[in-house]
Image (cartoon, grey):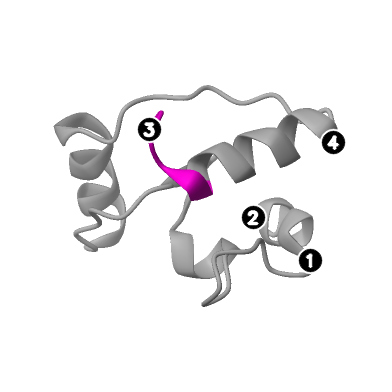
Amino acid sequence: TPTCPRCRLLATALRRNGIDYNEQPLDAGPISSCLCDTGQWITEAPLVHVEKKWLVARELFDDAGSLVTGWREVLDDR
């Protein structure tokens, strides 16, 4: 979302690393898709869909709100 600091941080990191992405609002569509695929009800942004895998904020960010070391590997680990 435009006001989400973690979303902006992730978007910047993706652009800097030449990773294409499609940004969408976290509304009923993505949440429903994640719920159907994983059984998890997620309402925290960012919610990342890579091929058939869903990644939630706690997998990409530490408690301080910084991207975790090895975040690219998390995205690549499909």
x%, y% of residue 70? 79, 66
The numbered mark, 3 or 2, whose residue comes first in the sequence reads 3
Q: Residue at x 69, y 35 (%)?
A: 12
Residue position for label 1: 70
Q: Is residue 54 above or below residue 2?
A: below
Q: Residue at x 43, y 47 (%)?
A: 46
CA gap, disc 4 to disc 3? 20 Å
Residue position for label 2: 78
CA gap, disc 3 to disc 2? 24 Å
Q: Nearer the viewer, mark 3 or mark 2?
A: 3
* Image mark count: 4
User: Is the magenta region chiefly helix, strand or loop?
Assistant: loop
> Secondary structure beneath disc 2?
loop
**Kind of residue indicated by mark 2:** Arg
**Kind of residue indicated by mark 3:** Thr
Q: Is residue 29 above or below residue 43?
A: above
**Kind of residue indicated by mark 4:** Asn
Does residue 52 appear in this view? no
Q: Give the residues drawn in magenta, as a range.
A: 1-6
